[in-house]
Image (cartoon, coloured by chain):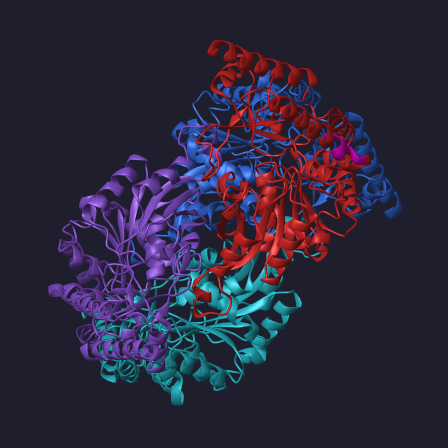
Chain colours: A red, B blue, C purple, D cyan
Amino acid sequence: MNFVSDNAAGVAPEIMDAIAAANGGTAPSYGRDDRTEGAHCRLAEVFEHEVAAALVTTGSAANGLALAMLAPPYGAVLAQEAAHVQMDECGAPEFFTGGAKLVPLATDGGKVTEAALRRALANYPSDAPETVHRVRPSCLSLSQPTEYGAVYSLAELESLCGLAHEAGLSVHLDGARFANALVTLGCSPAEASWNLGVDALSLGLTKNGCMAAEAVVLFDARRTRELAWRVKRAGQLLSKGRFLGAQVEAALQDGLWLSLASRANASAVRLATGLADVPGVEIVAPVESNAVFAVFPERIERRLREAGVGFLSWKYPGDRWDGRLRRLMTSFRTREEDIERLLALAGGAATTNRVVQG
Amino acid sequence: MNFVSDNAAGVAPEIMDAIAAANGGTAPSYGRDDRTEGAHCRLAEVFEHEVAAALVTTGSAANGLALAMLAPPYGAVLAQEAAHVQMDECGAPEFFTGGAKLVPLATDGGKVTEAALRRALANYPSDAPETVHRVRPSCLSLSQPTEYGAVYSLAELESLCGLAHEAGLSVHLDGARFANALVTLGCSPAEASWNLGVDALSLGLTKNGCMAAEAVVLFDARRTRELAWRVKRAGQLLSKGRFLGAQVEAALQDGLWLSLASRANASAVRLATGLADVPGVEIVAPVESNAVFAVFPERIERRLREAGVGFLSWKYPGDRWDGRLRRLMTSFRTREEDIERLLALAGGAATTNRVVQG
Amino acid sequence: MNFVSDNAAGVAPEIMDAIAAANGGTAPSYGRDDRTEGAHCRLAEVFEHEVAAALVTTGSAANGLALAMLAPPYGAVLAQEAAHVQMDECGAPEFFTGGAKLVPLATDGGKVTEAALRRALANYPSDAPETVHRVRPSCLSLSQPTEYGAVYSLAELESLCGLAHEAGLSVHLDGARFANALVTLGCSPAEASWNLGVDALSLGLTKNGCMAAEAVVLFDARRTRELAWRVKRAGQLLSKGRFLGAQVEAALQDGLWLSLASRANASAVRLATGLADVPGVEIVAPVESNAVFAVFPERIERRLREAGVGFLSWKYPGDRWDGRLRRLMTSFRTREEDIERLLALAGGAATTNRVVQG
Amino acid sequence: MNFVSDNAAGVAPEIMDAIAAANGGTAPSYGRDDRTEGAHCRLAEVFEHEVAAALVTTGSAANGLALAMLAPPYGAVLAQEAAHVQMDECGAPEFFTGGAKLVPLATDGGKVTEAALRRALANYPSDAPETVHRVRPSCLSLSQPTEYGAVYSLAELESLCGLAHEAGLSVHLDGARFANALVTLGCSPAEASWNLGVDALSLGLTKNGCMAAEAVVLFDARRTRELAWRVKRAGQLLSKGRFLGAQVEAALQDGLWLSLASRANASAVRLATGLADVPGVEIVAPVESNAVFAVFPERIERRLREAGVGFLSWKYPGDRWDGRLRRLMTSFRTREEDIERLLALAGGAATTNRVVQG
């Protein structure tokens, strides 16, 4: 039973079929094939907007490329202090941007607040003598959903985008699990992105059933050529691009990405609801995507570990759980019987615990 | 009939099977899975050497990472003037190394000669006042086979490696089609690499039947951690790494990579031999891998194009063919009937030609 | 009356004389002249240690080069959140290092504490699966004195160096005002640097009476050549190097740098002592170098401003003065009569104030 | 007798006076002082154009910054193969641009020809599938005068600028000795720069009598802020900027820079004329600035060396002198008696030579 990561789940059968189907005959290389073209068409359709887009193989590359399009080397990317781009990409944003500064925003439950953004911007005045001494705030990067699984409301996003634009910053969305957020929000991709003022999106599809497929999506189509150069230069232009195009095309076809994400989200809700009923287990955040953050009594954790249930210890700068926070991820592939078995194990350990204590 | 590139050929069935087989159940992400481990074991076995290796998705990334391991930002990478790292990676070597200088070596038929290397090194004396004004030659990068399809003999390589090491340079091999060279040389991977003094190899498997799989191989295993950091930072660490590991593992298992390359090489020989018999066609270089470089009379070229035969116009800085050079690539998947058909078309056009002229 | 910055003070006469004296006849260029050699000798003498050193023209260049010698691009530089390298160099550390991550350490009065360092290091475990996802902590950068004018005791520094080394980090000292700290500590340069475990020092001389002269000092002499390449590449190797060498040589000759710093420190003490006697003025930090941090009643500040006294509004992330903190810098050139006049103005405004209130 | 470099000549008295005069009282730091403002005014006046300018301390920094303003990281800078930016700045252009590719242009006597530029551009087609695989030619960098001391005519420059612009490239002039070229051309700075289509100029003043002063001059004033950020980030913003401003202001005041350059040029002409009369000495290029390139019979060279005359062995990729080329530089400070003495030595050795041979 693996609740470690949605990355552990492998490839959805529909995606695997599309990959296999792409293997017939020869095809032009380096993204000039029909599948890649199809994927680009799907992106424009799904977002109801012309886009400058690129298909890449990792989220770190997607984020790095998006940020490089939005921040000059002498610029700053503002992102919450525990964001993936801050902590989990080994400096990829610094690498791709040519050394832009990553400025950490204090966080409240993983979301960037207006107040935190204002405080940070105040350190970088645009009209003072010190302006030239400080990097130029260029881009606000938000994770949707956040690394805590929370989903910004459209109103929250719109207000952050407004504040950022007013201060001259572009807005980037790290959408490694964007589909999971969409399902929760119940709105269209357009409503959840450019319509709010989002300038660029890292659209993650790997965690959502693809093999290795992410899209950099800029809502300014004039930047297509610059993006293409940066992609090639970063070693992200696949020679047999059709197999990447096929994944993206299939995922976006007929809402597959949304139905896969729905499944994952529903599993997370089921898991959290069940765990909340187990005495002693604390669910520390509302479940808004496919992550459950919980604190377990020691005995329950031991029982789960012994039974081979996999999940991660989680930690945020300054969190209050003192190393006891755990993250359980669900995916499109999470089986109901595994959830039930986990709940039974936890419930059993809880009961035993009370009996013993009694 | 596609002779444009071996990248046009899709995925070998054995590789596709391995990918599909890797999809069962859950697996640890980010390269901590069994398939990736298997691939690393295969690499050590095949090269008969401990290695620091990384699996990545493109040749540009493999080259960039290898060069970044061998050249500091204030260093120079010496490579022939038309090498892939010079001309066809949109500055990826500069990007990955943090701005090392790419110094072009004049070329003779695509191979770096000792004389050319000595001339270049003479511009970068190590003991003169100007030393600090010039970048430090750090790495010699050779393509094996070359971009002209030629294969360096072991003696040639050994001598270039010796000269490089003597001058304090490491040696990198861009082995985008390394298997094709091995087949021609008839020697072991070890004999064709570290045994000659090669420090790092970009081992290409994509052109040879994989979907998107290249390996950076350093023959100094102590550098494993540095390489891993660089890979992650470059956005090249796949989350679902098992599908990359499976490709490499399968390719290196039971000599599959060599038999696929043998097929491609044999097709190239058949194609070149046939074309050489067509009056007016000039084969401009010996066929030592899976590339055929030819100059066609205009009438023959027109006939081939009209019949939908795909191949590339080729050009090297300073070549003598004035835009008339053509490259035809074969692959593991090239069909004998396509070669025969191409030869028939060419032969027919040649005959017509003479009759008309007569 | 300018208390804005010690940079406002111009050049000490002894330094100006040395510059003029260096102008006789011809001299080898690019640092191969006698004055530069003399400066290097003085550095080794003064620090009682072989060094790899470079003379440069700005503190940002000195810091950037020092950090580039200590942190790889995939590394992290840990420094307190309001340090010069974090906030006031427009991303120079990111530029010079090729994109290393700057990790902010929470600060207590401008000093990095052991606890803050431990907390930060805990986010970058060296033995966990996430290691490769996070940049590698490579260097602890401390400002001595701090941006608040505080001076680390030798014991504090030794303990921070020990903790850093234990975790595999090098230690860099941003010594833009190192001489001012030395004077306060009353110890030798050696005792305040390598003897404690400091690996590299940015030795600032510009603020202390030079025209534009800083030294990068590494206590590992084997790195001389790498440093030289990086300096040239950064456009910091002066062609007429003798004028830079002459400044450093003269400053370090016969303790000039220390006597200039003593003067500046003494002026700061006099200024702070006097201000502390003015009712309503709060001196918010002990004066340990040549900076006075004060909070003024509004009426006093107005009077000072009206009289043309220059000083800066100061702000640190999260400080508690709500924009009312002011910094007054003294220098080797601060005149006693200016201090007395400032105190008289402040005292007068304070008295008036009370009378009016009364 | 030092003919090694114009960098060996120290500082002109007028400049030294201006530096000393700038030392009175306090002044705002970081370029907000009157001298820096004065220098910027002089630049606009002298060039009869609004400019975005920055004062820096080295030619490598000026070139690097100018190129970073004109070429993106995925771009290419085209410059002749032996240009300073190619060979003598330890990769500073790659560093400042974030890894743009430096493409060498074959040279004819040090000048870039239209034919060479066209050939290079042909390798980077803008409309072909390979476009994305190759860096984007972004900037043509020309040295005026060239590293061989030759001066492009206005017509030559205009035609190269036109060709560059047509292909979408900006034009940068490395004017390390721009004043020497102006004197030869007998035209105004405007006529020799933006009027021809030059977009950015590295205006060298150090070799021409300053201590350490170069200006980056862009003829698009809207780019002032971006340039300022890049300058600070590169560690090139001097804290005591008035001493840099004073040099530039004084040099540009009342044509001082032109009269200093005239003196240097006249000395070179005298030297070359005299040497041409010495039997066996070959002057290998017309003297158009302050450099004399000569080939000496061995006996004459020995005599000069023995007498302590300093000059450089010179070498260009592919030159025909087989290591026997020598460069003699004059400066504003070259004394007539030194020239006469050198000529006497050479003449004497030549005579002796013939007698012995006879």
Which residue lies most toward the bottom here? D254
Range of residues picked out in magenta: A255-260
Indicate whether residue A256 is drawn in magenta: yes
- Quarter of the rendering containing residue A292: top right
Q: Is residue D175 visible?
A: yes
Residue A104, x across and y down, in percent: 49, 48
Residue D264 against residue B207 in the figure, above or below = below
The residue lying toward the viewer, choosing from B316 and C194, is: C194
Horizontally, is D74 left or right of B21 in the view? left
Q: Is residue D206 visible?
A: no
Residue at 40% x, 44% y: name it.
Answer: C76
- Quarter of the rendering containing residue D287: bottom left
Figure quadrant of the N terminus of chain D: bottom left
Indicate whether residue D307 is drawn in magenta: no
The residue lying toward the viewer, choosing from C317 and B149, is: C317
Which residue lies most toward the left here? C254
Residue C313 against residue A297 in the figure, above or below = below
- Quarter of the rendering containing residue D148: bottom left
The residue lying toward the viewer, choosing from B307 and C151, is: C151
Which residue lies most toward the front here? C358
Residue at 63% x, 14% y: name it.
Answer: A341
Figure quadrant of the C terminus of chain D: bottom left
The residue lying toward the viewer, choosing from A57 and A9, is: A9
Residue at 54% x, 42% y: name it.
Answer: A83
Horizontally, is A208 left or right of C88 in the view? right
Residue C42, x across and y down, in percent: 16, 59
Residue A279 against residue D251 in the figure, above or below = above
Helix, strand or loop: magenta stretch: helix
Q: How many marks?
A: 0
Residue C74, x across and y down, in percent: 44, 42
Residue C355, x across and y down, in percent: 30, 79
